[in-house]
Image (cartoon, coloured by chain):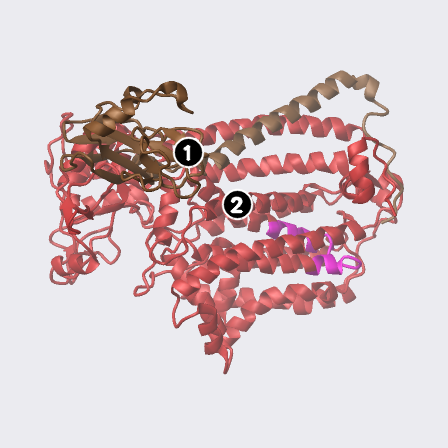
Chain colours: A red, B brown
Amino acid sequence: MLHKSQFNNPLIQWIDTRLPIFTFIQNEYGKFQVPRNINYLWAFGAIATLSLAVLFVTGILLSMHYIANTAMAFASVDHIMRDVNYGWLLRDLHANFSSFFFAAIYIHMARSIYYGSHKNPRELLWIIGVLIFVLMIATGFLGYVLPWGQMSFWAATVITNLFSAFPGIGDSIVTWLLGGFSVDNPTLNRFYSLHFLLPFLLLAVLGLHINALHVVGCNNPTGLEPQMPQDTVSFHPYITVKDLLACCLFLIVVSVFVFFAPTYWGHPDNFIPANPLVTPSHIVPEWYYLWLYAILRAIPDKLGGTVAMFGAVLVLFVVPWLDTAKVRSLTFRPTARFFFWLLIIDITVLSFCGARSPEGVWVLLARIGTGYYFTYFLIIMPLIGLFERARLVPASLSEALSLKKAVRGAVLLLAAGGLMLSLAGHAWADPELPAHVWHQSGPFGTIDPQQAQRGFQVYKEVCSGCHALKLVPFRTLQGIGFTEDQVKTIAAQWPYLVDDEPNDEGKILKRAPRPYDRMIGPFANEKEAQATMGGSLPPDLSLIVKARHGGEDYLTAVLTGYQNPPPDGFKLIEGRYYNRYFPGHQISMPQMLQDDSVTYADGTKATVEQEAEDVATFLSFVADPTQDQRKHLGIRVIVFLLLFSGLMYLCKRVIWRDAH
Amino acid sequence: MSIPPDSTALGTSKENQNGPNRRHFLYLGTAAVGAAGVAATAWPLIDSMNPASDALALATVEVNIASIQPGQMIVVTWQGKPTFIRRRTEDEIKQAQDVDLSILRDPEPDSARVQRPEWLILVGVCTHLGCVPIFDGNNLRLSDPDFGGWFCSCHGSQYDTSGRIRKGPAPYNLPVPHYSFLSESVIRIG
């Protein structure tokens, strides 16, 4: 039987009568009725969907360049950043949008609880939403492992070991999850596979979520069901234009991070390649898992901590039944509102605890926070519904609209989300470093090629004796103003040789590097370096600016921070040097930069400070050779988005003028 | 939810006051700016699948040809493709030069395909479907001994001593890469 189509276009009608997809779109995204009073918090569903779409597109393109092999994963991510056209953009978008996807979902969830969107008849809608959240947690964790930095590796180790807490079968589960006895190549491979699979599952569940929504309809700030035609507006154009405007504003916020602070939400340790023998002194998950991490650590028992952490997520599944209140929206429930805001503060405090080392007051705070979290859901929520006295609820949505309430909640929720985001990200303290003014800092800053060239001279004449730049090809130097021929000469005169192709006799001989070769150092491998350097390992400097808190400031501080003799009472280990800024103050590297360690061709006076700043600038460039391009593009993107948001705002006003 | 369709659809009551033209201009303008934004966003995504800068950096190779004797050929890799460097004998050169261009499928004089008649440099990829042709100096599989060049065993294309297509399905001659003699004994391809 053919479907009766409303469309006049013959092609659309032909398809629609056989597969009523156009009717479906028109019903679900055109005519679908939405309460007219929903506020901008309702846009976070669309914002999250947009984030998911960006993650899909960038993720699939990244997967074309990424290599899931422990020997190559870290280098392949660096290759994406360095060599792939706009690879840095794909990677920075993917990393930042995963952060902001979580941010959007947290606001979306908080809004649901605040306005009672989980209550009858929307229980299943809420449960499917929590399922999406669980899939997000898993996908986010799996994806974080892929760059194969130190944080990746140790996150994989710690999280998989959670399962060892289960008595009896725990260890077998962990071995099965890892595909070995430690996190290794089989683990990375399956994590990559699953990181690809889970988003598609998430997409399917999202389909159910939206389907369920379109059956029960949208809640609204009053929590009252619409009764009359004038209580609602059609999804298109009223809600589409509002969602688009919100998405534009959201894109502006994300763009600021993508283009001007792409590593803001990340952690410097993840720019150090995974090392199974050394755990970083302070490991933390990404900010969006911090509250769960705090709950895990709050319980001084392995099984207990694991159960509490899983429980903190699982309890969300039964929220529709824990919440016994008859009135949906907290707008009319002052007592419940108080405890709700306490919960938001509680999760923020837990996030801070998760970012800190589990010592002193942070342990106590995490325990109080964990206690309140479960008390809220298991005790306060059920009881308050029975005992509180709700304020007078308007009889109908139309009546409520004339009261114009519930705006305050939206503003507060947004402010709380923003506060949580901005603070939790930087909850760890940077060491006190003397700040320098860098030509490359700020959104309009660029690398000064003159200074970077001087820095290269310092690197070549002083640092390269021990430190390699093994991710950086010589041709990169063209980015700071060396000509192609100069780069060729620099490579040909490099003191260290690379392996040539096998010659006609099959022998592998050494040859001078060429521009496409990388700036290798004197040591063939780490063992040789340690044997030569008396046990200490000079780190590779390719990404050193990204791999240390404080970046260029830290490098300059360490290079100039020597003190001889050390302060009274400080016990220096034999063969180490006292440095004010090096963690632990005992550094194996002697003070290498002295006044006039190099002679600058441009006549700049070679003081220790000058040399240190120059080499830090050079290393900033090699760690992020596309930084100038990134900022330049960012300014154009943000100007465009501002313009587009302005137009969207005008469209929204014109369209909504008819609805009021 | 069973709500009757909304009656306050676009542009009813106040349309005349706002002016439908100004309103449509705003919608169209916004849509155009949005479309431009989407188009501009597409470029980085597409470009990311183009060769990366490390692949481009390997776009030239330098080859020492001093040890190649007349009648010998070496195969080097350039951009991942087999590239033939053949030092032709006097006979091969004569064979290549004496061909009547009017009978060729892709007419090209030998002089346009070499910089020095002795050295023939070809990208060794059959222009039919990309297999690597085999040099068949003994005319074991070439249908005409006059060809004296390459035979592609995939689909039977036959090339002469200048790498020109003579018989079989391939439409064009074997391509000559951009190259230059850096000295008597070193050429740079690419």
As rendered, which of A507 and A35 lies closer to the eye? A507
Percent x, y for residue B153? 39, 43
Q: Which residues are magenta?
A: A105-127
In this picture, residue A283 sits left or right of residue B24: left
User: Which chain's residue wears label 2?
Assistant: A
Indicate the amino acid at tag 2: Phe
Q: Is residue A535 left or right of residue A258?
A: left
Residue denoted by label 1: B127
**Dot 2 and dot 1 within a common chain:** no
Q: State whether residue A42 is above or below residue A174.
A: above
Q: Residue at x 67, y 64 (%)?
A: A317
Element type at mark 2: helix
What is the CA distance from the residue labelled 2 to the residue labelled 1? 45 Å
Q: Which mark is residue A309?
A: none
Question: Is disc 1 placed on a helix, strand or loop?
Answer: loop
Which percent across, then down, holds residue A591?
A: 14, 48
Q: Check if residue A621 falls in the magenta segment.
A: no
The residue wearing badge 2 is A97
- What residue is shown at x 24% (from left), y 26% (from top)? B93
Neighbour class for label 1 at 10 Å: few (<14), some, many (≥20)? many
Q: Quadrant of the C terminus of chain A?
A: top right
| Neighbourhood count class around disc 2 (C-alpha, 10 Å): few under 14, some 14–19, many 20 upward | many
